[in-house]
Amino acid sequence: MTQTPATEKPLILIVEDDRLLRTMLQDILSNHYRILLSMDGKNILDILAQNPVELLLLDIMLPEIDGYTLLKRIRGVYAPDDLPIIIMSARDDADTIVHGFEAGANDYLVKPMKNSVIRARIDTHLNLSRLQRQHKEYIAFLEDNEQLRQQLSKIASHDLKNPLNNLRLVEELLSEEMGKNPRIQPLLKTMTASLDMMSDIVTSFVDVVEIQTRNIELNLQIVEMHTVIMSALMQYELTAERKNIRMDIGSTDGVVHVDEARMAQIAGNLLSNAIKYSPRDAVVKIHSEIIDGYVRLSFVDKGKGVPLNERHLLFEEFANISTRPTDGENSTGLGLWIVQHLTELQGGRVGATFPDAGGSIFWVEFPVYDA
């Protein structure tokens, strides 16, 4: 069934044998939708095949054909996601309503119907149908372009990361030579922030492509948690210094069987997150401990935390929460999503707790390695 162009009003087919009700429906809906009318539904499949109908209002009591039979015929051709159908009936008993849904209806309206209710139901199902179509189109796009994404991943990994590394080297040289010049300092700060943002975007893009295409190869080995923590500290030491954030290392207990590079990436993402959302002059605490057969690695910050009603979004792709980085740092909304996928891929678990005193504790845990 051809879809209505976005610039046109949605096309609705009304199948109703009562002439007065049919006219009334046309009058109240024609300002918002384009309307097709049918009094008996005998040629309904032909009408649907020839017109880009987006929703069907179907009277269940028709003169020459049972509405349920007609509904089942339509459902043999059009799925509920492709063509929402709202049936109309004067009967409001439970058995009749259940029968309608079993036959394939998306919704059920009891006559007489309020104008506002009709509009609300129609708009709801039109929006749901459009979202479903967009979802299917997106999935088809991803499937059709998997090879392209893999190629883009290679480009991002090599052709973009290498120039970034060169720019980092230039940044360091300029800082050594001219970093004390008050006129140059703001420019260097802007350059550093831009490079940080570009690096985050490129790295996140590569990780997302690898996860979505299941193109991640794991090299499992025995890894001490102490090594993981020290690697993350070295990676983000300068980042913490820019905000005068002190990193407090507690216990580093535990040995796990993981991919060391991916484990370092997980720890780095969580430490970067803790630094971004901590205020200047704060302390970020890092420690690992053994709990019920798991090694738990925790990152504790003293930031604002996350509102209760937004915590379910934390590990979603492109999560959009109201808490923002404290010093204008970039946030792609992908860091925690990547952490979750890399952790679960290696048989681990991820989570977050928010103490009453404030701040956040983000943690990952993996089974204790037992030789």
Image (cartoon, rainbow, N blue to C red):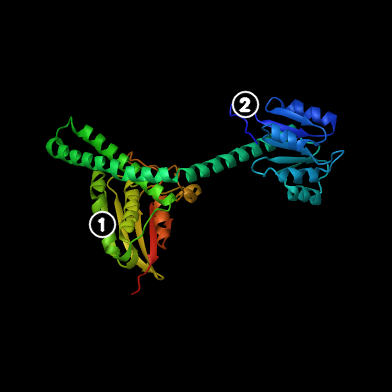
Q: Residue furthest left?
A: 177
| Residue type for callout 2 | Glu
- Spatial separation of the CA atoms under disc 2 and disc 1: 57 Å
Residue type pointed to by label 1: Ser
Badge number at residue 74: none
User: Which secondary structure lies at badge 1?
Assistant: helix
> Residue at 76% of width from left, 51% of height from top?
98
Which quadrant would the C terminus be assigned to in this image? bottom left
Q: Which mark is residue 8?
A: 2
Label 2 Cα neighbours within 10 Å, binned few <14 / some 14-19 / many ≥20: few
Rendering coords of residue 324 (x, y %): 39, 42
Q: Determine crowd level at label 1: few under 14, some 14-19, many 20+ residues with C-alpha closer than 10 A.
A: some
Secondary structure at badge 2 equals loop
Residue 367 placement (x, y as % from top left): 39, 68
| Quarter of image, res 192 | top left
Q: Position of residue 116 (x, y in %)?
A: 71, 33
What residue would you read off at disc 1?
231
Question: Is residue 244 among the parts visible in the rendering?
Answer: no
Which residue lies most toward the bottom here?
371
Up-down relation of residue 340 to residue 146 (above or below): below
- Res 316 visible: yes
| 361 in relation to 5, above or below | below
Is 234 on the left-hand or right-hand side of 80? left
The quadrant of the image that shows the N terminus is: top right
